[in-house]
Amino acid sequence: MADALLTVENLAVEFQRNRDRIYAVNGVSFSIAPGEALGIVGESGSGKSVTLLSVLGLIAENGRITSGSAVFQGRDLLKLRRRELEEIRGRDIGMIFQNPMTSLNPVMRVGDQIMEVMLTHHVASPKEAYRRTIELLEEMGIPEPEVRFRNYPHEFSGGMRQRIMIAIAIACNPQLLIADEPTTALDVTVQMQILSLLRDLRQTKGMAVALITHDFGVAANFCDRLIVMYAGSVVEVASRAEFIRRPMHPYTLALKESIIEVGHRHREVRAIPGMAPVLTSPPNFCAFADRCPFAIDRCRNERPQLRSFGNGHGVACHRAEEVLELVH
Amino acid sequence: MAVVLEQSPAVRPRPQSRWLQAWRRYSRNYFAVAGLIWVILFLLTGIIGPWIAPYGYADTDFLNVYQGPSWQHIMGTDNLGHDMFSQILWSTRFAIEIAFGATLVSFVIGVILGLWAGLAGGITDMLIMRLVDFMYAFPSYFLNLILVVKFGRGLLPILFAIGITGWAGYARLIRSLVLSLRNSDMVEAARALGASPVHIARKYVFPNVMTNMVVALAFGIPYDLTAQAALSVVGLGPAPPMPSFGNLVANANANILGYPWLLYFPAGIFALTLLSFQFVADGLQEALNPKGGN
């Protein structure tokens, strides 16, 4: 896509753990259009967080980006120097995290923390930053913003803290907001509130959102387009409608079988047998083969490439056509 | 769809500075408050003691040696007729200078090496921590003795001798705090929002370890007071006639069979001071790093 906001191409990330080399991300490509909501779905350890963290240069010291590019507004983020990347983080790309209980600085008033990011990036004078902070708190649905400005994080609930994290992340009006499991630590009602807050923000500010989640339901509910990751590779990418109508990859199918949905009372919930693998060698096979009911010899010897099935629907499976026929 | 607005709470937390909150927790601990009062008195005495002392520290009164407490000498006199009260006032000043100075020296060395080890990691960390282990293992009193014998028994040599033997604990504490903070969600979030390493150190790491440092300092001061007194006991304190708690106790010890009261005032006051510092440190620990409960 020529007009994409962020284009990640063939990204690979490795981690060194004691003697082992872990292949966490193996040639991932995707793009996010301006204003789009992209869901990145996968189990723990599927490489979904690492993919986006490495784009921002935030992976741990034992991690290494071995190939790929990530072009954001015409600049390859992977080639930028630390200082240049720091300028982009928080200003052009905002980020919120899984655990709002521990992500705020406990010794700083929350208002100061929201102001701080604007002052760090020189997007506002202290006076403007204060005014905007009050506005943001109001937008986040926090009552009595002038009073709450002066409270410390421990005086807020988890949902309120996540709202404050969001306020910090969007304070500089970024074009892209990366939300790394933003609702996982919150209870279900608060989860819905936070998601509808994010949806409003996307509509009013035209901000693109990359939602990283393990919850297929949340992703299908929130996103225009979904990417399913498994063992550091993209196994399927499609629009929400396509995903609901004809999911193709055996892993996606299994994932859908394994979640409990309202109204599917008579459907059996089936767990996926086995565990997600940790790759200690580069995958020249299909990583899902061991858990896949459709697996054939070819799956264990040749890595499936992402193939297009029209409508922007891509699947990385040797037997995608047969699966499609069998299931639908 | 509009943002879901939460109801204004019926009872809302009144914004209150964290120091005020800490003070409220502190003031509930009566031992800590009593300790603080004694410590403040002790500090005041150290500052204004020489002006309120009824006699000079070198004044002797050979007609009134070995006196018990009287109106003329409220804490009695020693074998040379020194006024015990004045001697204690002067000792206090010396004790405070040494204790605070030496603690500051240890603290600065400890913070620098601890931060360095924690932030640099790898081989630097390893080398610094082995040095810390060495300092822990080596008897610090012995090292104090060697340094004071080598560099003299003035204020500064004693101060530095105690200072450069006592930093290992601070270094270890700071390093562990830095390590745990470095991988915290909070620092990761700050990095994701574009904070530079310097900014993170200043706004995130330092304020969050500061309370621990204050507590460590409060525990460190009585330790250095003891170290200084221990040097004086073996005659490596300030040169006579300048008194110090160690000298006074050592002198009293020599006369303990005939004149035991010589020991009561200096030893008693010194012990109370140590205890008070301990109470203050405990109180600070509880007030600044509350672990729930209560």
Image: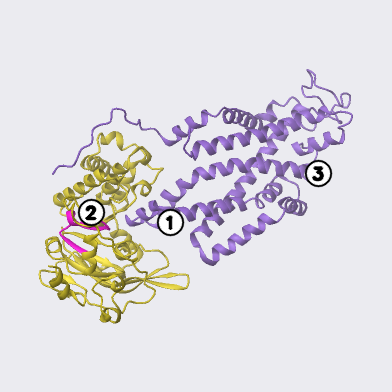
Chain colours: A yellow, B purple
Q: Which residue is mark 3?
A: B235
Residue A105 horizontal side relative to residue B66, left or right:
left
| Residue B126 seen in this snapshot | yes
Mark 1 closeness class: few <14, some 14–19, many ≥20 residues within 10 Å: few
Camera-side residue of A84 and A292: A292
- Is B269 rendered above or below residue B140? above
Q: Give the amino acid at mark 1.
A: Asn
Residue A130 horizontal side relative to residue A19, left or right:
left
Residue B55 horizontal side relative to residue A64, left or right:
right
Distance CA(mark 3)–CA(mark 1): 49 Å
Which range of residues does the magenta coloring cover? A208-227
Q: Give the amino acid at mark 2.
A: Ile
Mark 3 closeness class: few <14, some 14–19, many ≥20 residues within 10 Å: some
Mark 2 closeness class: few <14, some 14–19, many ≥20 residues within 10 Å: some
Residue A40 covered by magenta stretch? no
| Foreground disc of the pair 2, 3 | 2
SS assignment at label 3: loop
Determine the chain carrying the residue at label 3: B
